[in-house]
Image (cartoon, rainbow, N blue to C red):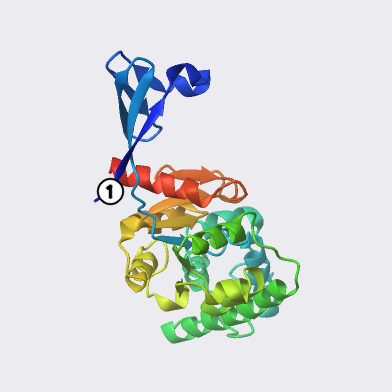
Amino acid sequence: MASHSTLFISPQNLSSNFSSLFYYSPQSLTFKTKKSSSLSLTTTKPRRLSLSVSASNSLQALIFDCDGVILESEHLHREAYNDAFAHFNVRCPPSSQPLNWDLQFYDVLQNLIGGGKPKMRWYFKEHGWPSSTIFETPPESDEERAKLIDTLQDWKTERYKDIIKSGTVEPRPGVLRLMDEAKAAGKMLAVCSAATKSSVVLCLENLIGMERFKGLDCFLAGDDVKEKKPDPLIYLTAAKRLGVSEKDCLVVEDSVIGLQAATKAGMSCVITYTSSTADQDFEDSIAIYPDLSNVRLSDLELLLQNKVAAS
């Protein structure tokens, strides 16, 4: 059972901005938050107010997406896909030029379909299966189509690795500090990404370092689950492996696809958006940040406590 403590607040010491959030009467004081939760305060004697707060801590596991959260990587993936299309001369009818996903289109695609192979399969179903140096004529059988996608994905992954290993890519602000805070506080730490395992491993080894990577309590990639985000399977699997309840997990995502996967799994989610996801609808998140540079573990603990209390 959660323990409780009493905090005394003197009204005359409240700033105008802070006190405007309170509704006061001689007998009671109610604090309204942006969410549906509220804190009830009752007076004990003049100028001293009693606030009952929960000292429980529901945050047990902090789960990060990789692409877009640990690193802003989508433009790197797009570059690698286009290099693969050019290398294999992938041409969708009626075009005679190699396929090229421009920035505007890829921003839509990457927020519509999770995972590299599903992206290509969806695109080719919509726009026609291509000719290439892999198959001179568009593949017609499921086996040939699977081979085409597997070949393109494997080459693209190797190209992406070369970009990551170039030393020009850095983690997004605040990520490493927040990971270290969570570990120091005894929280479980996980990474769940829809990307292929080899590319995620490379990113983590190069961007968070081997010590942090080996210290993860759970690591799942797209290869580890049958269904990709926005399906919740990857997060449900993570909770099971961590041995914690979904409600005690907090997910850090950058896109609406990831947000949907987390919330469908019964987990709360905070958003750290990128330039390509900034305009998405993140209404179901419990907080939205441009990056994690000013976000502390205590902030996330309080957010999750308020969410659990309000539900």
Q: Which residue does the image show at 64% across and 80% down from the upper left? A: 158
Seen at 56% across and 62% down, the residue is 180
- Relative height, residue 97 to residue 287 (above, below): below
> Going 54% across and 43% down the picture, which residue do you hit?
279
Q: Is residue 205 left or right of residue 270?
A: right
Q: How many marks?
A: 1
Q: Quadrant of residue 257?
A: bottom left
Which of 233 and 36 lies nearest the eye of the viewer? Answer: 36
Residue found 62% across the figure and 54% down from its top: 174
The quarter of the image holding the C terminus is top left
Relative to 180, residue 133 above or below = below
| Residue 235 visible within the image | yes
Image location (x, y in percent) of residue 296: 54, 49
* Residue 156, percent from left and from top: 62, 76
In the image: residue 310, left or right of residue 142: left
Residue 95 coordinates in the image, percent (x, y):
64, 67
Q: Sort mark 1 into few (<14), some (14-19) or many (20+) by Cα contacts within 10 Å.
A: few
Identify the residue at the far left of this view.
1
Q: Which residue is mark 1?
A: 2
In the image, what residue type sits under mark 1?
Ala
Whether residue 266 is visible: no
Note whether 11 is above or below 242 in the view shown. Answer: above
Secondary structure state at the residue bearing disc 1: loop
Q: Is residue 80 left or right of residue 234?
A: right
Point out residue 208 in the picture as x, y percentages from the top left corner. 62, 68
